[in-house]
Image: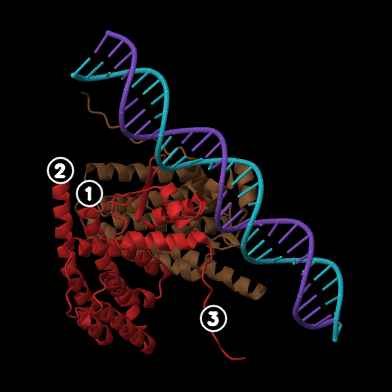
Chain colours: A brown, B red, C purple, D cyan
DNA sequence: GACAAGCAGATTGTCGACAATCTAGCAATA
DNA sequence: TATTGCTAGATTGTCGACAATCTGCTTGTC
């Protein structure tokens, strides 16, 4: 019998599709932070009943990008400067851990996948598709987590990714200018292919810090304006 | 006006209560790993309709203690030795981070709370209430996370806690013997009150390793038996 | 005018029923 | 016998309607 691996067929519940739709809307910024999600309106737009929609919303609440107040509504989470700060300082430590764990497990498949994802980022950059650029950059970054062979670490990263993507999208939309076309990931990829683990860890930390400072400054500006307006 | 902090009143939705009930049943081992949750049967037992029950189950799926297969059912997660291993090796790193972050923020309230939670563990031990002993021990341990002033770190810990509690409960039920009455947390508490952060980190790591090895051995035994039976 | 009470509309939470899907068992066929 | 097709029962997914709750406005009272 020929050896052939079939991948599981896709979930075909409405709920799963709704989750994907809503997540995308939030992560791309179509649904803004703090915005309320009206169940009736959304269910009518999607042509589904409220039951699967509500179940989908529960999932996203647990995923950390929605928040729910009983009898008041479900809202896109608000982003504070501290949230961003917390996420990033946590991410730094996780990155070091992931690189350490993945380091010995790197193989040809790892390097191939690394190149593939790097290429995807470059393609999105050429296309000036900022949403996809953020998405692919996070996927490139996520490879070390997938290779670290620790389910909890990977799961934690995936949870965090949602929020990181949301933060970046927010930032991109705000400054509303073309993305730097230089390839900021080149060094990162090269270091992951090299022999110096410490150097890779150090670069991951510093590389992240760059965008982070910018993002944080933006969020602080937002809060300042908000408190002045209130 | 007198300064008085009111805590938010409890969620009064059926959903929230169902979540609490189900979580408790899973974490205490009343619902065993791999077991299927029949929606109709549970909803009848709880005297609620399936809608809030299903929403509650979605939350627990995202929380990581249930798993769902479309049109097949929702099941309590299966616990493999690798899952336990992953959780613990991740937890070690998180612990070091939490202690580091919380260290400078320790104050009188921290020490008081530390003693209070330590006392709760001792009380549960005296009562021979194994479930509560596990619960309080994890709460004692969680204090450093609450004090670390990082929302992502805390949230990650809380997610992990569910599974740790489940693993321990499983183990306790399996060996079915009285819990050691000696106070294994004394040194931990003393170190957290002291001046040597590195020592505290080291102890947290080693202290965890103890129970961990036992738990892991048990899980490996389970898997061996399972593969032999199949 | 300030303030409390109460009503109306909108929205969320919950329910019972129906539709879609899966599973196990049996019959039919080669 | 092994395999396929079918059917009945059970279970999950989805729907539309009703109940509970909140919010803002109006009204009445001082």
Q: Chain of mark 2?
A: B
Secondary structure, mark 3, is: loop
Secondary structure, mark 2, is: helix
* Disc marking residue A23: none
- Specify few, some or many for label 3: CA neighbours under 10 Å numbering under 14, 14-19, or 20 or more: few
The residue wearing badge 3 is B6
- Most extreme residue toward the bottom, as rendered? B2
Q: Residue at x 35, y 36 (%)?
A: A8
Please tell me in which quadrant of the rendered image residue B72 appears: top left
Closest to the camera, between mark 2 and mark 3, is 2
Q: Taking the image as drawn, is residue A229 in sight?
A: yes
Closest to the camera, between mark 1 and mark 3, is 3
Q: Which is nearer the N-term, disc 2 or disc 3?
A: 3
Residue A122 shown left or right of residue B14 in the figure: left
Please tell me in which quadrant of the rendered image residue B71 appears: top left
In this view, the residue in front, B129 or A196, is B129
* Disc marking residue B229: 2
In this view, the residue in front, B14 or A226, is B14
In this view, the residue in front, D29 or A145, is D29
| Image quadrant containing the C terminus of chain B | top left
- Specify few, some or many for label 2: CA neighbours under 10 Å numbering under 14, 14-19, or 20 or more: few
Q: Chain of mark 3?
A: B
Q: Position of residue B118 (x, y in %)?
A: 28, 82
Q: Judge whether A187 appears above or below A94 on screen.
A: above
* Disc marking residue A106: 1
């Amino acid at each position: 019998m020929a050896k052939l691996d079939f991948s599981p067929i896709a979930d075909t519940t409405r709920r799963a599709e709704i989750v994907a739709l809503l997540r995308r809307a939030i992560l791309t910024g179509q649904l803004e932070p703090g915005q309320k999600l009206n169940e009736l309106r959304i269910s009518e737009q999607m042509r589904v009943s409220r039951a699967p929609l509500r179940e989908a919303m529960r999932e996203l609440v647990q995923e950390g990008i929605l928040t729910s107040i009983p009898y008041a509504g479900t809202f896109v989470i608000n982003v504070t400067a501290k949230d961003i700060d917390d996420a990033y300082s946590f991410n730094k430590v996780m990155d070091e851990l992931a690189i350490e764990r993945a380091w010995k497990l790197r193989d040809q498949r790892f390097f191939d996948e690394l190149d593939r994802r790097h290429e995807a980022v470059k393609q999105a950059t050429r296309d000036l598709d900022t949403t996809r650029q953020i998405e692919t950059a996070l996927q490139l970054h996520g490879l070390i987590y997938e290779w670290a062979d620790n389910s909890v670490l990977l799961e934690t990263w995936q949870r965090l990714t949602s929020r990181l993507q949301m933060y970046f999208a927010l930032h991109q939309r705000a400054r509303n200018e073309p993305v730097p076309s230089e390839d900021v990931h080149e060094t990162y990829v090269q270091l992951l292919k090299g022999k110096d683990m410490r150097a890779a860890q150090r670069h991951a930390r510093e590389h992240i810090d760059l965008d982070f400072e910018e993002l944080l400054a933006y969020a602080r500006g937002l809060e300042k304006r908000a408190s002045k307006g209130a």
